[in-house]
Image (spheres, coloured by chain):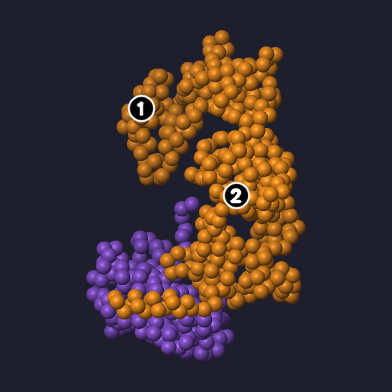
Chain colours: A purple, B orange
Amino acid sequence: MAGYVREVSRRVFAQEFRESNLTFKDGDDQYSPQYLLTPTGAKVNRLFIVGTLIEKEDIGTDSEYWRGRVSDPTGSFMIYAGQYQPEAAQALAECETPAFVAIVGKPSTYTTAEGTVLTSVRPESISIVDVTTRDLWVADTARRTLERVKDLDNMDSNVVKAKEHYNTDKDHYSSMVKEALRSLKEDL
Amino acid sequence: MDKTAENIKSKFLELGVDIPIEDIVDRLDKLVTKFKVPLDEARRSVITYFLKENDLDRNAFFGGQSTTPDSRSTPDVKLNGIDEGGKWVNIKAKVLQLWDSSHESVSQVGIIGDETATIKFIKWARDMIPDVEEGKSYYFKNVVSNEWNGRFEVTLNKNTVVEELDEDIEVISSPIGGAGDGQPAPMVNVADIAEDGKWLSIKVKVSQLWDNSHESISQVGLVGDSTGTIKFIKWTSADLLDLTEGNSYLFNNVVAQEWNDKFELTLNKNSSIEELDEDIEIASSSIIFAGAMVDVQSGSGLIKRCPECKRALTKGACMEHGKVDGTYDLRIKAVLDDGNTAQESILKRDLAEQVSGITLDDAISMAADALDQGVVLDQMKLKLLGKYFIVTGSKVDRYILVDSIELQDGLDMEMLDELITEAEVL
């Protein structure tokens, strides 16, 4: 059966996510999915994050609009949930900080007046998880990131596009992964 | 495609209409290439278009020269003489099998045979022709031959006259072995099944029974032996005993059918089932998938099923049986995601209870308290989303039908060390 295929939730560390700024659409009608291409060539329409919710704030004026900061071993993700993400907004409102959270969401970008591109996550769901889940995610994300770093020598069109745009430094990302994995080992 | 176009052109020429070949090719190509229509369908559509364009009767094209043949000019033929579609013929043949009609517009369908060959026949409901009986011989006058998917069949129509014969038409012994003559079809293993339309007997264990999709189907699911697993369909009209999951059976005289490149077994009126005392071992065709649960889809949680066909109700109504008093059930339709694949997975009641910690009774009272059965889904999401699981099960279409599910409960230190080594050498 052809047709709708659910977008895979990509695994990207906060540092790589923050260093991403290239968005594009597959196809040119208004319903074509939008993607964020990361420096190691992950083509992200949806991502899965597990980290620590370290801050949250209702920055809405008329209605609730929640901003949260979720950290992983390499940095932090900004997440924004308002009236169009009611379940996620409610979860954020009720959640205590800090807490381990798992988030499934869509990448979103914002360009500042100075031309800097800021990335954030628009959550579809936020749930409270335990530390085991968080550790599993770090290992999981390390593995997927290493796979992408290894594939940087390929001629895959996304990889080529990513390398052209970011001039990707392999060592930068392999040492990021190494640090993340070491932190995991030290914690235990 | 060019051959099809030529064929259409020459048929129209016979009717005295000369259609430029480019026009035919253009229309065919547009349908096949741009709109992905299968060639058979495209051919039909193109013919219809040009018939209309030239004010011709469909029967003129499909039925040869005249729309109401007089039987004096219709030739008597033997079945192996049918080698062309769209011919009017008379045949003397014996009804070997009657199949379950898959559609209400078909009144009878099955196989007839004579001493030279066997052929499928179709009798339409609209033509009001008396029913034929299995094992009897008839003189079929004014039937039309058709080619369908590379095979021939004959169609009875409103000009057809069916006369029962006193003589017993002798029938070629081959290509359909087994059924009809009381001899059981040969015993095979699942892995040996490789031929469409083959009658066979097989010993299997029922590994799964699925939600039934149609009232004419009494049971559908998966059976297997030591060589593999295969889907089976048991028709309601076959009137056979109901199978139980986990039990082993001997299926006599079932038919292998090819569907979407896969084989399935159909149990029909000529089939029989015997329950076996032995336990047939099923080859493990199960797959393992590990990933995070990123979604619990709608249709999960507390649902109601139609008491007759077991299908899930939508808004209290069954697609087949309308408004019914449903029976409660629990299930989870989960998406597990490993970062490379988003895998849809279905958990039946026992696994849904195990993994969510909510029993069916809990769920029913939760829903009653909240006046909303959606609370069950919400609770399941709270409990399950974002966590890592390992499931085993069998892959059916895009789903895994889950046999077991476990929470991943810790890091594998060896894997961690391997990953660190990998990162260091990069």
- Residue visible at 64% across and 44% down? B203
Camera-nearest residue between B48 and B306: B306
**Residue at which label 2 appears:** B224
**Is A117 situated left or right of B84 in this image?**
left
The answer to whether mark 2 and mark 1 are in CB contact below 8 A is no
Q: Is residue A72 visible?
A: yes
Question: x, y (%) of residue B399?
Answer: 54, 58
Q: Is residue B353 above or below residue B187?
A: below
- Can you tell which quarter of the image residue B174 is in? top right
Outermost residue to the front: B278
Q: Secondary structure at mark 2?
A: strand
- Residue visible at 23% across and 70% down? A164
Of the two numbered discs 2 and 1 on the same chain, state the one appearing first in sequence.
1
Question: x, y (%) of residue B95?
Answer: 64, 24
Which residue type does callout 1 highlight?
Answer: Glu
**Residue at which label 1 appears:** B6
Camera-nearest residue between A119 and A176: A176
Q: Is residue A125 above or below residue B67?
A: below
Quadrant of the image containing the C terminus of chain B: bottom left
Which residue type does callout 2 highlight?
Answer: Gly
Pointer 1 local density, CA inside 10 Å: few below 14, some 14–19, many at least 20: some
Question: x, y (%) of residue A116?
Answer: 30, 82
